[in-house]
Image (spheres, helix red, strand yellow):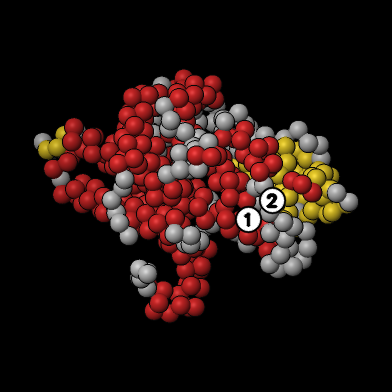
Amino acid sequence: MDFTVSPRIEDYRARIERFVEDRLLPLEAERASYDAHDNIRLDLADELRAQARAEGLWCLQLKPESGGQGLGRMGMAVCYEAMNRSIFGPVVFNSAAPDDGNMMVLEMAATPAQKERWLKPIVDGKVRSSFVMTEPHPGGGSDPSMMLTTATRQGDRYMIRGRKWFITGAEEARHFILLARTSDDPRKGLTAFLFDRDQPGWRIDRRIGIMGPEEHGGHCELIFDGLEIPVEEVLLNEGDGLKLTQMRLGPARLTHCMRWLGLSKRCVEIARIYAAERFAFGERLSRRESIQMMLGDLAMKIEIGRLLVMKAAWALDQGSFARKEVSMAKVHVANLLHQAADTAIQISGARGYSKDTVLEWIYRYARQARLVDGADEVHKMVLNRNLEAEGNTFWRWAVAE
């Protein structure tokens, strides 16, 4: 693959970099910029989202006909990394989870009528969305075949009953993509549905408190006790729910990694500045070999992560599901983010542990990275499954035709 980026992508990256530097980073230092859950205040986010949209830095992940910029996965990798130099970046550019993955899968899977009804308002920034899949034990989590929520067809409607939890963004969302069981078929037993916040027959049971800062709308537990969804709001076809999850989760996992690389670089940036300024025992911290080794190790691992992400992005742009590539990137970058935050706090000492920098925010946020969209162990099992099936061809190079 070619590791150069086009002048157009570089232009987007540079403009995002300036926007983040000039408008977002100063806000992080002001406690008034935050809501009660350590995210950017919604009214402030809306102001900045309007500015980003006016400058053409909006929905880079979508095609122009959907209201985006059509940068492709490789262009997204470059730009998402630049966005998440700020903890506020992704939501401002309409590239934050779960809207990010929801918009991409609706662009791929929705009918024209569904795109007008469900996708366009998210693209326009008028509503937020949520992806409703994970269930409490003994229901489905990383293994969707265990899903217990049911969708029973009754004439021209489906009746939904069940329970979901850790549904990101549910409290602020208006549009939802729901996965439910329509049969016991191991491959065709799940179906994806669209529903609106105002439809009766479901409720938010609670917003689940977590150790880290929260996305807008939190992580909620939902109860479905008779939600009726018309047949025209099935995504793809009945029985295509597993296919829909594969279409959504692979690219969405990779966009997490793109963003996490930006946060990892921010950790190094903060640590380097502190080490260059701080004296201890008559010497700058940055002159100490132990500090140099810590920062050099992070620099290397960040570059490894960027290469893994870019290879996976390239494979997706080629039309592959890139399951191996995405899993490798997900495991590496999730662990990298945690190490980067931990190392930067160690170098920064008490200042890093305080709220004088965003390091403690990133540290609390980082622990979820090894769990969301598949725990490390699940992805490693997937990789071993591929290794057993492919043997030494696991590491084959793609050959140009």
Amino acid of disc 1: Leu
Residues 127 and 180: in front is: 127
**Location of the N terminus (image quadrant):** bottom left
Left or right: 306 as drawn, with respect to 185: left
Do tag 1 and tag 2 residues touch (Cβ < 8 Å)?
yes
Question: Which mark is drawn over residue 235?
Answer: 2
Residue most toward the right? 155
Q: Position of residue 398 (x, y in %)?
A: 37, 69
Q: In this view of the protein, can residue 328 be seen by the observer?
A: yes
**Location of the C terminus (image quadrant):** bottom left
In the rendered view, tell whether residue 269 sits above or below residue 382: above
Left or right: 296 as drawn, with respect to 240: left
At 29% from the left and 36% from the top, the residue drawn is 270
At 51% from the left and 61% from the top, the residue drawn is 321
Pointer 1: what residue?
Answer: 244
Q: Position of residue 178 (x, y in %)?
A: 69, 48
